[in-house]
């Protein structure tokens, strides 16, 4: 038997997901900020709503981010594949930096006009640090080889 989900269940999934689920409008202002986003980035729902995505984008990456963002808003296409998981540094409320794995979705209205972007992000800092550590160990082992 297939379960038919209602709007209530979809909302519950989005609101309580452990991953950050964000929605930003055409200008890059946050319109959806779930519990996962609160946990990962440290901003409450009230603090994040209506704010620019700049609150989570490290300053050194903002120019490149906005170039890609507005290009995708205008063209409806990403530089990366729809099903490609991307990895980028992100910034938390306390100023710390984390590594996020994320995917993006272009949102369209009933007239097929692009109205914004949705992103699903996961804190991948532990995995990124472990990979960095392993790469350093491999490099050290290679140095020791005659």
Image (cartoon, rainbow, N blue to C red):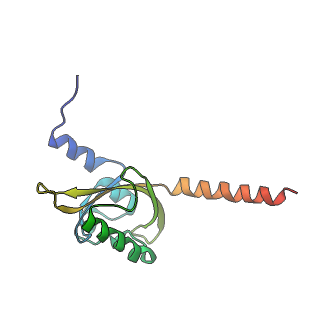
Please identify the quarter of the rendering in which residue 92 is found.
bottom left
User: Can you name the residue that lies furthest to the top here?
Assistant: 1
Q: Position of residue 79 (x, y in %)?
A: 39, 62
Please identify the quarter of the rendering in which residue 56 is found.
bottom left
Quadrant for the C terminus in the image: bottom right
- Number of numbered discs on residues: 0
Q: Position of residue 66 (x, y in %)?
A: 34, 73
Image-based side of 35 in relation to 31, left or right: right
Q: Please report the residue visible at 78 percent of the width from the left and 57 percent of the height from the top.
A: 142
Q: Please report the residue visible at 48 percent of the width from the left and 55 percent of the height from the top.
A: 124
77, 99: nearer the viewer? 77
The answer to whether residue 80 is above or below residue 66 is above
User: Can you name the residue that lies furthest to the right here?
Assistant: 146
Q: Position of residue 129 (x, y in %)?
A: 58, 58
The answer to whether residue 49 is above or below residue 17 is below
Please identify the quarter of the rendering in which residue 60 is found.
bottom left
80, 41: nearer the viewer? 80
Quadrant for the N terminus in the image: top left
Image-based side of 32 in relation to 61, left or right: left
Image-based side of 15 in relation to 134, left or right: left
């Amino acid at each position: 038997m297939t379960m038919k989900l209602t709007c209530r269940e979809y909302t519950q999934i989005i609101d309580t997901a452990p991953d950050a689920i964000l929605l930003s409008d055409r200008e890059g202002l946050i319109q959806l900020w779930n519990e996962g986003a609160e946990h990962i980035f440290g901003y409450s729902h009230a603090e994040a709503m209506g704010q620019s995505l700049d609150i989570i984008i490290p300053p050194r990456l903002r120019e490149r981010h906005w170039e890609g963002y507005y290009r995708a808003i205008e063209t409806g296409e990403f530089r990366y594949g729809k099903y490609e998981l991307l990895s980028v540094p992100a910034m938390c409320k306390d100023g710390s930096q984390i590594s996020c794995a994320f995917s993006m979705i272009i949102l369209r209205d009933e007239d097929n006009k692009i109205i914004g972007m949705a992103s699903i992000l996961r804190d991948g800092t532990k995995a990124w640090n472990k990979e960095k550590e392993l790469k350093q160990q491999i490099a050290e082992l290679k140095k020791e080889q005659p």
